[in-house]
């Protein structure tokens, strides 16, 4: 009876979640429609290889920066980079994309897009820029897209930078290496899920690989942001490893009634489990306290749903610690959250996973 009741409430929660996300996406698409970048009137039109027209003054050079493997809130965010006659960046702006106008406007009204002004491409490739709170995922994507494009130009010999080493491996080889590493971790996770006793000796290796490969190197993890993105805009198969993770995260618990993603794949869950091994004497949470803590995850998710309904919530990345793996873009709030819960996990293993994580709660709903 309790299981049936839980399943009914889970279905209701998922329906409310989908309605809330749909309402949020609808509000965002109409809130600031048409408020896109405006360029100077005295311009020269330059055709790019993608068929889009870019604008620039006669003494300026225009570059189109694209990085299909970098996915923002609603997909790829191609950029228009304008260079002065002496090779310094005059402006970085958006080309047409599927991001919501609200995110685009918040970015343009800030100083974020001016972060590279006055730098050469060689200086810009390693320039440290903080992501913008309120449009975190989109601005992370902008930073990474610009860096990828410049590095590609260095690799191809289009531009030369003193002290800048050319990449030894080509882009295709790099993509193959990244994909192979991700599949290795996912393969080990599946073996550990189906054969837990036989794979137990390899548990530490799986945890370490998850943190290093999926966390710090790849930035491939499930989060409220990514799940809301999929429900709002559909799957983006450019990086198909994430859709595969999401499908397995919901399908395996539905079939086997056992948690898969949280226990075997999630890099932050792995990090918590690793730090918990630093302390052999863990704190035993009293039953009365435990009975209260177990309601934190659904309460957290319901708060997010409520904020979606009202249109207040505009950025989800700061609500979870996962973006803290992106050390190169200085996301302080997720880093602080991650640090707090890692410390707590020394005394109570996987505290975030057990009592706070809304992503884990959503995958638990189908069990």
Image (cartoon, rainbow, N blue to C red):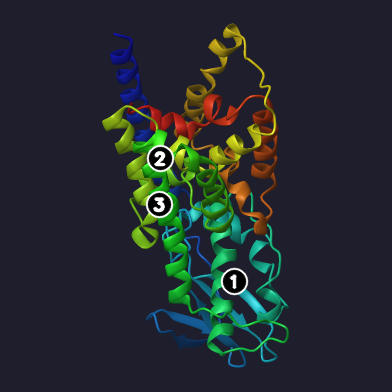
Q: Which mark is residue 86?
A: none
Q: CA distance from mark 3 to mark 2?
A: 19 Å
Q: Which mark is residue 147?
A: 1
- Residue tagged by mark 2? 192
Q: How packed is label 3: few (under 14 Cα within 10 Å), some, or many (20 or more)?
A: some
Dot 1 or dot 2: first in sequence order is 1
Quarter in which the N terminus is drawn: top left
Q: Position of residue 28 (x, y in %)?
A: 45, 47
Dot 3 or dot 1: first in sequence order is 1
- Residue tagged by mark 3? 242
Q: CA distance from mark 3 to mark 1?
A: 22 Å
Q: Quadrant of residue 319?
A: top right
Q: How packed is label 2: few (under 14 Cα within 10 Å), some, or many (20 or more)?
A: many
Q: Quadrant of residue 163?
A: bottom right
Q: What secondary structure is marked by label 2? A: helix
Q: What secondary structure is marked by label 3? A: helix
Residue that appears at 36% across and 37% down? 195
Q: Nearer the viewer, mark 3 or mark 1?
A: 3
The residue nearer to you, when weighing 169 against 134, is 169
């Amino acid at each position: 009876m309790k299981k049936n009741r839980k399943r009914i409430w889970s279905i209701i929660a998922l329906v409310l979640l989908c309605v809330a996300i749909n309402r949020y996406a609808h509000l965002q698409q109409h809130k600031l429609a048409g408020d896109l970048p405006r360029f100077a009137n005295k311009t020269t039109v330059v055709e790019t290889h993608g068929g889009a027209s870019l604008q620039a003054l006669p003494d300026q050079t225009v570059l189109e920066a694209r990085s299909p493997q970098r996915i923002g809130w609603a997909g790829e965010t191609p950029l228009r980079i304008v260079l002065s006659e002496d090779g310094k960046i005059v402006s970085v702006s958006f080309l047409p994309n599927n991001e919501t106008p609200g995110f685009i406007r918040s970015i343009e009204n800030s100083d974020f897009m001016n972060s590279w002004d006055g730098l050469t491409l060689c200086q810009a490739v390693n320039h440290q820029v903080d992501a913008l709170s309120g449009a975190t995922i989109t601005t992370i994507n902008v930073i990474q897209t610009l860096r990828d494009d410049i590095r590609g130009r260095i690799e191809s010999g289009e531009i030369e930078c003193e002290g800048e080493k050319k990449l030894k491996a080509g882009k295709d080889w790099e993509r193959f290496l990244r994909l192979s590493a991700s599949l290795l971790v996912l393969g080990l996770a599946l073996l550990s899920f189906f054969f837990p006793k036989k794979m137990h000796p390899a548990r530490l290796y799986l945890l370490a690989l998850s943190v290093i490969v999926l966390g710090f190197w790849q930035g491939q993890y499930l989060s409220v942001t990514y799940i809301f993105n999929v429900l709002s805009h559909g799957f983006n198969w450019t990086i198909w490893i994430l859709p595969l993770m999401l499908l397995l995260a919901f399908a395996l618990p539905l079939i086997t009634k056992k948690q898969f993603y949280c226990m075997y794949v999630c890099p932050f869950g792995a990090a918590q489990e690793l730090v918990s091994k630093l302390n052999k004497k863990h704190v035993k949470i009293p039953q009365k306290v435990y009975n209260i803590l177990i309601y934190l995850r659904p309460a957290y998710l319901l708060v997010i749903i409520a904020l979606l309904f009202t249109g207040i919530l505009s950025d989800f990345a700061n609500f979870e610690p996962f973006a803290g793996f992106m050390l190169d873009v200085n996301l302080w709030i997720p880093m602080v959250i991650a640090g707090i819960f890692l410390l707590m996990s020394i005394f109570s293993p996987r505290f975030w996973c057990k009592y706070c994580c809304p992503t884990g709660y959503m995958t638990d709903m189908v069990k």
